[in-house]
Amino acid sequence: VSGIDLTGYCRQGGRWGVRNHVLVLPARTASNTAVARIAAGMAGTVAVSHEWVGPADDGDTDLVLRTLAGFAANPNVAATLVVGVSDADAPLVNAIRARGGEASLVTMAAHGGTAGTVEAGRAQARALVAQAAVLEREPMPLSALTVGLECGGSDALSGITANPALGLASDSLVAEGASTVLSEIPELVGAEELLAARAISVEVADRIRSVIHGFERSVEALGVDVRGAQPTPGNIAGGLTTIEEKSLGAAKKAGSAPVSGVLEFAEPAGAPGLYIMDTPGHDIEQMVGLVAGGCQLIAFTTGRGTPTGSAIAPCLKIATNTAIYDRLEGDIDLNAGGIVDASRTLAEVGDEIRDALLAVARGRLTSSERRGHREFALRRIPRHVPPGGTSRLASLRVQEATPGRL
Amino acid sequence: MTTTAGLRGLTAYRRPNGGVGVRNHVLLLPSVMCSAHVAAEIAGDGPAIAITHQHGCLQVGDDLRHTRFDLVGTAINPNVAGVVVVSLGCETINGSDLAIKIASHGQQVELVGIQAAGGTRRAVEAGRAAARTLVETAAAGERVSVDMWDLIVGIDAPDDALSAPIIAALGRRGVQVLVAIDSPRGAEAHVALAAGGAQIIVSLPRADEAAIGFVVCPVVAVGRDTDLHRALSDDFDVIVESDEDEGEMSDRVTQRVLAHARGELTASERRAARDFVLRRLAVTM
């Protein structure tokens, strides 16, 4: 047992949360409005919205259900109220329960539409908040903590200050028995051999190479130039020149611990250790994947400065440079910029990040929590791209049946 | 064709660039989802409306081009009197470029950047000031008499059996009808129709679908005589009876369309359903 004191909320199945939210979750876009109004002004609840309309023939259904179910089953959530259109949305509730979460369903069809659903949903949400409020923090084993490692709006200092400092914090947490998860596969292109060399087995090493090479092949198949998206215009303005340079800096968030495995998007980690999850580089999509995989906490380094947060998992933001930390007043939690002017050492900042992560896990609010940042996006894998579907204006026409002016 | 007795004309807002809007919205447009929260904070419960979307960064190729096209198209829809683009600052769909593109169509536009302003709090302050000015300008606009031909009605399911009689009835009243071809139907068609200039949308959800609104256009939701649509009747503007005569049905829908174009709120507007669904053509990088 380590000397680190951690507290959290004990959930069924031996899982532990560091927050105690009631999540109000739309099953489809059509219930976004009801969800927002159910959660409006009700302390203890959080809400997200998304753009999945839920067509029956959607090839993404499994991915969307896995993402929504994993997110709702994150142990930071005491209970989820799923707002569905009809009983056809019951599979989402079942999927949340299968992942160990608590979920109940209110449907718009049972209440005449949105207005009645808001009234019924508010009563249900209030009851769930009252149930959650009874729970108290208890001593939590560090082995139950999983921290997502993320960088967004990287600059030339990311790989020199904040990322390697976060790497030291990750190593320290993993050594004490916690888990950490590196993600953003597009930002590991060029770092695959460095990571594969740290794999705990030949199989894991092969998985690391295959998931990174698989991303490269998928971009080639699209027949597009990835520059402009990776690195982004902001990365380039921040001094990064190539995706390989960005990657070598991004990989430093994972320190030097052995890599225990490669996870699918939104897949939970197994035994404690360092993992790599297959996610896009997009800050929000990857954060949703990490949280849907069970990360209770996100450590997020930023060079350009982004205010991002998650609805249910606290996100600790670390600036790579002092200028952006000062400039984005109140949006960023820690500053790793002192490493470049030699006022602080990497080890000092690494310790500060680890200690801050543990303090946040024990209940201290992050900047993004205080400011209400709750970004949410679903990863989509479009399959039916129309050939030459560039201009949608070209595909519009004024219908022939308009005979002219009166 | 003659004008029937009792048929009232149409009133709408004339825009400086010649457009004709049936609503008078000030729009908070995030260039990237990272700034959607700030856009929503700026809007608050005030008169301006905010789009929440999940795009704008790490997109490539056609997927990037059509996303930019749809964001610009929504912002220059004639129902929009003015736009505040809310940018993060490092995103792929650069906020400044987006604002310039919107302005090039004669739309009033202001730009607020989170990184440029110095964080969330200052961006919200700057955005509220910009939105307030645009709201004041918009409030000075008044409905004036316009030609029926100035009204463009988008239909989100052109292959639906109900569409042909509705299109014909709208055409008899002299309005233009816009449909999206080779485009997804339903919510995913709304942004294409708005970007194409439709000021009002007739939506025909399938029997297993609920009604969905759209952020800058009134959506006239037409349901059918099915268990689900009956059960969701509050969210529909018209429910078509299973034995209803085609002519009666299409007249009823057309009268609703014209009433809502004149200013009566649709069910989706009353429940403040500001949906925005963008079809993605490629994975996010």
Image (cartoon, coloured by chain):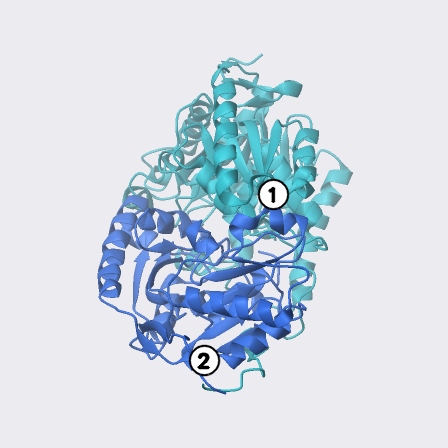
Please name the amino acid that badge 2 sits on.
Thr
Position of residue A361 relative to residue A138, above or below, is below
Q: Nearer the viewer, residue B239 or A355?
A: B239
Q: Could you tell me residue B105's position as x and y percent?
A: 36, 76
Q: Nearer the viewer, residue B30 or B225?
A: B225
User: Which residue corresponds to the image point at 48% horizontal and 20% vertical from the top-left?
Assistant: A130
Q: Secondary structure at mark 2?
A: loop
Please name the amino acid that badge 1 sits on.
Ala
Q: Secondary structure at mark 1?
A: helix
Chain letter behind tag 1: A
User: Which residue corresponds to the image point at 46% horizontal and 42% vertical from the top-left?
Assistant: A36
What residue does disc 1 label? A109
Q: Could you tell me residue A12's position as x and y percent?
A: 64, 19
Residue A225 visible somewhere in the drawing: no
User: Which residue corresponds to the image point at 31% horizontal and 57% vertical from the top-left?
Assistant: B112
How many numbered dots are placed on residues in this image?
2
Position of residue A167 relative to residue B168, above or below, is above
What residue does disc 2 label? B4
- In this rendering, would B126 be left or right of B76? left
Indicate the colour of chain B: blue
Question: Quadrant location of the C terminus of chain A?
Answer: bottom left
The chain coloured cyan is A
- In this rendering, would A230 be left or right of A88? left
